Image: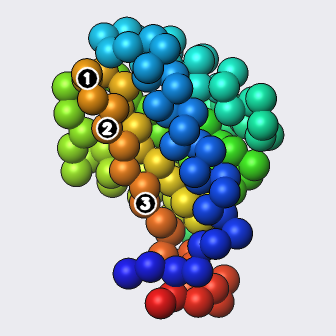
Amino acid sequence: MKWGDSKFRPVTEEIIKAFFKVHNELGPGLLEGVYHKALFLELSKEFNVQSEMAFPVLYEGKEVGRYIPDLIVNNKIIIELKAIETLSANHKAQLIAQLRITKVLIGFLVNFANKSLEFNRLDNFYQLEKDGLKLD
């Protein structure tokens, strides 16, 4: 399922370029925190980027915890970074939960650990439909 995300496309394309730039510059095998800082610096050249901003998790109107995405770009796109052997369904579920809690529309899950950069884009279809944005 796709949606009319044309207004986000220029930003998401630049984010993907930043993933590759950081991966090409640093290479695989470093700790996640190194990639986090490098990507924050790279994205901050063009965008408003927030690092590890906490969002409350509510249950029946009461805060029961906090969710902290790695990076948020222009208050519209979450980036969850990993430096692990392979991305799993659990990592995707983590990003989906972050999208749902923050009401952010687009998320990227990116893994810098391997020779080939690995990333996935996930869209918050629940929030899109709730906001009345058109699904194709």
Q: Mark 3 is on which residue type?
A: Leu
Residue position marked by numbered label 3 in the rendering: 122
Q: Nearer the viewer, residue 20 or 92?
A: 20
Of badges 3 and 2, nearer the viewer stands: 2
Which residue is pictured at 43% across the width and 60% down the height?
122
Vertical placement of residue 51 versus 76, above or below: above
Are the residues flagged by discs 1 and 2 in contact, CB closer than 8 Å? yes
| Label 2 crowd bin: few (<14), some (14–19), many (20+), radius 10 Å | some
Q: Is residue 130 visible?
A: no
Q: Which mark is residue 12?
A: none
Q: Which mark is residue 118?
A: 2
Vertical placement of residue 129 versus 34, above or below: below
Which residue is pictured at 64% across the width and 72% down the height?
6
Residue position marked by numbered label 1 in the rendering: 114
Q: Mark 2 is on which residue type?
A: Glu
Q: Is residue 113 visible?
A: yes
Residue 123's spot in the image, x, y percent?
A: 48, 66
C-alpha separation, residue under disc 1 versus residue under disc 3: 21 Å
Q: Secondary structure at mark 2?
A: strand
